Image: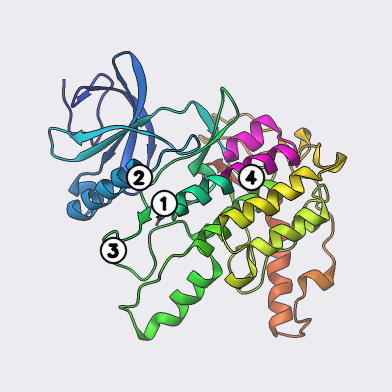
Amino acid sequence: MTANLLSPPSGAVVDGWLVSRELGDGGFGIVYLAEKNGKPYALKVARHREASGDDKQTHARMVREATTLLMLDHPNVIRPRGHGYAEAGNMYVALEYVDGWTLAEWKELKHPTIHEILRVFVQLASTLSYMHSRGVLHRDLKLVNVLIRKSDGEPVIIDFGCATYSLAEDLTEEGLPPGTERFRAPEQVRFERERKDNRRARYAFKVADEIFALGAMLYELLTDPWPTHSYIRAPLNIQMPPPPAFDVNPRIPESLSELVEKILSREPSRRPVDAEALRRELEEHLERSGAEYMVPAHAPSEQLLAEPSESAGFPGVPPKAPTPRKVPRKTLAIGAGTGDGPGRGWDLLAGLWRRSRLAFGTFRAADDIPS
């Protein structure tokens, strides 16, 4: 039985791949659990024109994703297992199936220690260093695009739908390349704000953008007890930097917090120069880590999830978070202005940040949707 792939039933066959169920839905394609020769695979199928609005653009991005994956051969990068075309004409890429948790799920379900989180990010930085040496930029690093494999605890970078490589055709039609707003570097935000007089200008994505995204992911895991839940989060990439991680979560060692601040610097030149430099700095912290690194980033009691409320039709609200440690005013009130000046604006933002730790939404979902 074949299907049009907009909503294939269980048992549909795509070019010899037996579709089981949908795994995920992204901007350029839909991922299904499929089977071939008795083995499971992830089958990513390009969207139809009706769904994507631009069949040519979607096809071009799928071709580039397949090309990018064929350029890489690394144990911490999702591996391609085949590609082709469905009967309807839309392209697919077959990928190894990774049975694992997203980084956000791993944080909530396994309660990793700070040492374990740091170990994962050393591996991710090493993987990025390899990718960059091959001329590949992922461009959409975020918590849901890294899986922790259940069998061995290894991280695997997935979803190369926004990726590009050296000398690749420019498919960007907007000022910024596709990606996720929360994990964009501050220089992208500045570029978008300043390019109003030149709508044809295109942002050149760089290694520094990737470094920032990895730092934003690390900051989220260190400071957010419930990263899978949707609620108001203070932005990480506006003019004023977020509060230091150890001010938001007193369990975080101050030296590690200072490194994260460096990675999230508003100025690219102040971040680690490349992924290898970032790996070395993270590894140095790992090697000299003491007892304070051997505790969960958040106590498991802080992460207990409420059961879904069937009457409301939405998952239940998590238990109230403990009152965060009060952040010193000198840290938040940068500029220390009065009235409506810059200090006042940041005071308000800092207040929002503190309240957002408690103001959880009423449904469980990822808040980082690709643009």
Q: Earlier in the sequence, mark 3 or mark 2?
A: 2
Q: Residue 164 appears at what percent x and percent y?
A: 36, 55
Mark 4 and mark 3 lie on one chain; the one further toward the N terminus is 4
Tell me what residue is drawn at x 29 percent, y 46 percent: 67
- Compute the Cα span from label 3 to label 2: 18 Å
Q: Which residues are magenta?
A: 103-124
Asked where in the image residue 4 lies, by quadrant, the reply is top left
**Magenta stretch contains residue 129:** no
**Disc marking residue 170:** 3
Is residue 359 visible in the rendered structure shown here? Answer: no
> Is residue 11 left or right of 360 when viewed as pictured?
left
Choose mark 3 or mark 1, whichever is in front.
1
Q: Which residue is labeled 4 in the image?
A: 122
* Element carrying mark 1: loop
Q: Residue furthest top?
A: 38
Q: Are marks 1 and 2 in contact (CB under 8 Å)?
A: yes
Residue at the front extreme of this rendering: 133
Rendered view: 164 above or below 82: below
Residue 195: x and y, percent? 40, 81
Residue that appears at 50% across and 51% down: 141
Q: Amino acid at mark 4?
A: Val
